[in-house]
Amino acid sequence: MNGIARIDEQSVLKAYARWAPVYDWSFGAVADFGRKRAIDSINQREGKLLEVGVGTGAALPNYAPHLTITGIDLSPDMLRKARNRVRQRKLKNIEALYEMDASELRFDDESFDTVVAMYVMTVVPDPVKVLAELERVCKPGGEVVIVNHFAQDHGLRGMVERWMTPAARALGWHPDFRIETITHMTKLDLIETRLLQPMGLFTMLRFRKPAEGEKTCATTGEGACCCG
Ligand SMILES: C[S@@+](CC[C@H](N)C(=O)[O-])C[C@H]1O[C@@H](n2cnc3c(N)ncnc32)[C@H](O)[C@@H]1O
């Protein structure tokens, strides 16, 4: 697992039971800039969207009404908040919110046009397995969008990261999670890498799953992505 220690399911459940009441005005608020940027891009798409690790549902009111949304999360405490939000905001395009493990999604292959995981990959016990699941449930021609913090050890950002390490660990994060854990572990085509606010601390990765019979970066053997 690329030097990443295993976080077990019980510690995730315990951590997010504690975080659920304060999440929206603590980390949830800091994460909002990046979340909104990713959603702007997702809202250009059509069809069915799966949000993995939907948390308190902070993103849900911002999705365009033409998208049909399913959310999943491991934590019943976070999901309770998300369900309240859907009810209070009378959101009509949320099809379902399920308690489910991202590493064992109970959906058929190729079920969703877009799959998104925001601030999730560093808290799941097995990010490589989760990535394979995101890929599996995405339709050919669909997109997988990942927003996350990836480690950087130098410059001002490196300093800020070291300062944030205790808070990051309290969220169950691995502050040392490297971008290659994602980019080297997928056959999807990387079509966009974008640094996000605040201070480029987070990164959005957009991947495209090749349509049936389509040439991919992997099959053309091109070093840089040929699809972007
Ligand atoms: C930092 S929060 C991000 C929540 C939300 N995506 C956001 O943008 O605010 C991480 C979420 O991932 C969820 N999570 C952790 N491990 C998971 C797993 N194996 N399967 C599904 N969700 C998981 C946590 O319960 C938590 O709600």
Image (cartoon, rainbow, N blue to C red):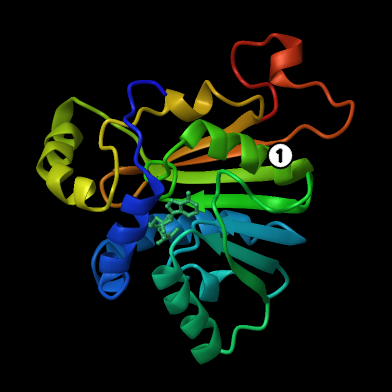
93 left or right of 126 in image: right
For the C terminus, give its image quadrant.
top right
For the N terminus, give its image quadrant.
top left
Of the pair 83 and 26, the residue shown nearer to us? 83
Query: Looking at the image, in which quadrant does ligand 1 appear?
Result: bottom left
Q: What is the x, y in percent for residue 172?
A: 28, 48
Q: Is residue 128 above or below residue 171?
A: above
- Residue at which label 1 appears: 136
Amino acid carrying mark 1 in the image: Arg
Q: Is residue 6 above or below residue 88?
A: above
Which of the 4 quarters of the picture holds residue 130?
Answer: top right
Which residue is at 13% across, 46% downward?
A: 166
Q: What is the x, y in percent for residue 5?
A: 31, 30
Mark 1 CB near ligand 1 (8 Å cut): no
Which of the 4 quarters of the picture holds residue 124?
Answer: top left
Which residue is at 34% across, 35% downward?
A: 150
Q: Is residue 53 visible?
A: yes
Which residue is at 49% across, 30% downward?
A: 182
Q: What is the x, y in percent for residue 218?
A: 70, 16
Which residue is at 45% across, 69% downward?
A: 76
165 left or right of 202 in image: left
Q: Residue furthest front?
A: 10
Q: What is the x, y in percent for residue 174?
A: 29, 38
Of the pair 54 and 104, the residue shown nearer to us? 104
Q: Is residue 56 visible?
A: no
Q: Secondary structure at mark 1?
A: helix
